[in-house]
Each structure stands twice: as structure tokens, then as C-alpha cells.
Image (cartoon, rainbow, N blue to C red):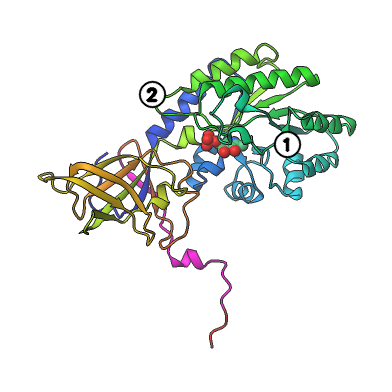
Amino acid sequence: MHLNTNLKTPCYIINYQELESNFNNLNIALEKYWNNYIIGYSYKTNSLPWIIDYFNKKGCFSEVVSNDEYELGKLLGIEKNKYIYNGPIKTKESFIEAAENGCYINIDSYRELEWATELRGDYKLGLRINFDIEKFCPNQSQCGIEGGRFGFCYENGELGKAIAFLKEKNVKIAGLHLHVSSKTRSIDIYKAIAIMIIKIIRKFELKLSYVDIGGGFFGGLSDKPQFSDYIKMVSEILSEEISPEKTTLIIEPGMSVIGTPVSYISSVIDVKDTTYNRFVITDGSRTNIDPLMKKNNYFHKYEYINKNKKKLKKQVICGYTCMENDRLYIEKNGLELEIGDKIIYEKVGAYTMCLTPLFIKYFPDVYVLEKNNNLVKVRQAWTSHQYIQNSIIGEKK
Ligand SMILES: Cc1ncc(COP(=O)(O)O)c(C=O)c1O
């Protein structure tokens, strides 16, 4: 991709072919190893309407974790039975509505257990499982020895109580949900998930129509595990107890499908020297690609307006905000950046657009780079007009 010099920056660009490739690889793995599956695209990872629509048109379900995300899906025309509803902040009204519409609902809290007892009939209700992933995979989970906070705990008996409660009230348990957020995204995490699933099925003698292993995979990176590696492992373990004939495998990918196809383009707008540093100021911001301010390196490349440059020992690449820590990285021994040069950050599609604050500048343009190299705008940058929508402003004097 060579960028048009007139491209207004900052902006995001979604590479259509890369997105297709990630999605196809995922499908191929599922077809091969568990040919009865549902892909629930994780809205929270990137809920840009164009992306939601893309996955919907591919036949995916919508994995939502709030009433707001559920309403967003409805606004975008998602069929009423094509949601997987997760998380602790569901509303009772949307819980009941989604269940009655035939959606998959993974119960995460005690209040939802109560709501479930108000439903009469055959619904796709599952339980989110909380288990000691650190025991299986030391130092790999996000929460370490403090443990995760979602679902019903297997080890301390709370899961047993939840199952007993539902059985007593004649509420059918159709599935189990075991998403784990890990630091490593390793295959071992999914091995542990699959082992836990069969352990729970055996212990509580469950007859399940689905098992949901959540998201958290790598995707689109040649030096990391591939979809086929994860699904093969899960399939081998699950096959000891369940089969695709009776049980649907649900997966909830986010990062693995939308992370790699998205780039963020910024331009150098100023260069200045201080006693200590050469600062390169850009019209992009760390808040747009690293909103949690945790990254210390980025996949990035340059497009220079002039390649005949000298090298500099140190250049500090900065963003547009007024925060001192809006410094993205230090370029060591690189070509001297000048006004108009572009810095392109790659693989920034996950937990970026959706976590970007409305701070100092509003949401930037988003384009899709089509197969024929055409750039099509799929979100117009926000202006103050969008910013003030829904505001109630005092009467003019
Ligand atoms: C329940 C659930 N499903 C799916 C995902 C998507 O995970 P990822 O974007 O890492 O694939 C998450 C992310 O936290 C999640 O909490």
C-alpha cells in the first residue's frame, strides 16, 4: 500500500484482503476440526458499524456484553436470534427478550439466575465458568493468582450451587462458557478450557447443546499459533466426551480477526529541539492506538516525502494531545523525520477505536482498502456536531 499524499490524517485503514484472510483461516479450521460451530464476533473488540456489518454478512453471530451493544446490533439490522449475550451488565429486559428470541445467553451473575427462573420453555441458557486457570497455566492469565472475576467458581462450589439451583427450578442448562483473557494467548489456555469443559460435564452429568470457548486467540500473525492449532487441540480433548453431532462449538473472536488488518496513519506536523531531545510532533495520538497507555513498541513503518536524509541518534515520536506522556516511541538511529512524512502503525484494530477517548480531538476517519486498492470511507471523522449530540444546553440569554 502506497498512500495518497492527499490523504487527510490521522485515519484508520482496514485492509479488506487481510480481514478476509483472517476470517477464512478461522472458518477453515472450524470446518476441519468441529464442523458444527458458531462464530460470535466480539463487539467490544471493535464495534465500528462497518465491521459489525461485515461479520454479520459473513454469517457470524454478534457477541454482545451490554444492553447498549445489543441495541447497536438491532440498529444495524442483526437478526433477532443471532446474538450471544455475555457479561455482568445485562438488563433484565434485554436478557428476557434475547432469551425469548432464541439467542445464546451466558449467565454471569446471581441476579441472572433469578431472571432465568422466570422463563418458561426451552432456551439457550448457559453458565459462565470461573476456574483456576493459573493452576493450569502459571503466569499466563491476566489476573495471575488473584484469579478472574467472571462467572461461577468451580473450585469453591459456587458453580455446583448455581447448577443445583437451576436444576431445582427446572431451568435447562444448554451450555457452558469459558472465555479466559490471557497474557500469552497460548494453546495451553485452550487445552485447560477444554479439559475443564469435560470435567464439568462429567461431574454434573450435563447434556449440552453448546460449549463456548470465548475469544482471546492470536490470528493473522505467522510467528504465533494459528487458528487450526487452537481448534485441533480443543477438538481432540472435547471429543473424549462430546461430538459435533450433538454439541455446537461457539467461539468469540475479536483481536484474532480484526487486530492485524487495521493500520493507523499519522503525519509529522512539527519538529522541535530542546536541551534533551528532538521531538517529532504528529497529528496522531497514542490515545488512538494505545488507549490504555501500556505499549512500548508498535509495528510501524514510514513514508518519507524525501528519502535523502541524514540519520539522527534519537527522535521522540509524539502525539497531538497535551499530555506529556503522549509519546509513542523513541526512534534510534533512524532517518530524520520532517514535516509531511507519514508514520503508519500496523495491526492496531483491537481495543483501539472502541477505547479512544473524545479527548482534545474527536474520532478520526476510517477507510477500507479494497482489493483494487481503492480507499472507501466507512466513517466520517466526528466533528463538534457529533460531539454535542444529546447534550442539553441552557437557553440563550
Ligand atoms: C467474553 C469475551 N468474549 C470474547 C472476547 C474477545 O477477546 P479477543 O478480542 O481477545 O479475541 C472477550 C474479550 O475480553 C470477552 O471478554
Helix, strand or loop at label 1? It is loop
Say which of 165 and 364 sits in front. 165
Residue under the image location 33 percent in, 43 percent down: 345
Helix, strand or loop at label 2? It is loop
- Is residue 226 left or right of 192 when viewed as pictured? left
Task: For the N terminus, give its image quadrant.
Answer: top left
Q: Residue furthest front?
A: 275
Say which of 99 and 374 sits in front. 99
Residue under the image location 43 percent in, 56 percent down: 363
Residue 102 - label: 1
Dot 2, crowdedness within 10 Å: few (<14), some or many (≥20)? few
Q: Locate residue 133, reporting x and y percent.
A: 62, 27
Label 1, label 2: how many angstroms apart (C-alpha)?
39 Å
The answer to whether any part of residue 247 appears in the image is: no
Span highlighted in magenta in the image: 373-393
Amino acid type at circle 2 is Asp
The answer to whether any part of residue 320 appears in the image is: yes
Q: Locate residue 79, reporting x and y percent.
A: 63, 41
Say which of 333 and 261 sits in front. 333
- Is residue 85 left or right of 23 when viewed as pictured? right
- Is residue 79 left or right of 339 when viewed as pictured? right
**Circle 1/circle 2 CB separation < 8 Å:** no
Say which of 343 and 132 sits in front. 132
Amino acid type at circle 1 is Gly
Where's ligand 1: which quadrant? Answer: top right
First reached walking from the N terminus: tag 1 or tag 2: 1
| In the image, residue 385 above or below residue 36 | below
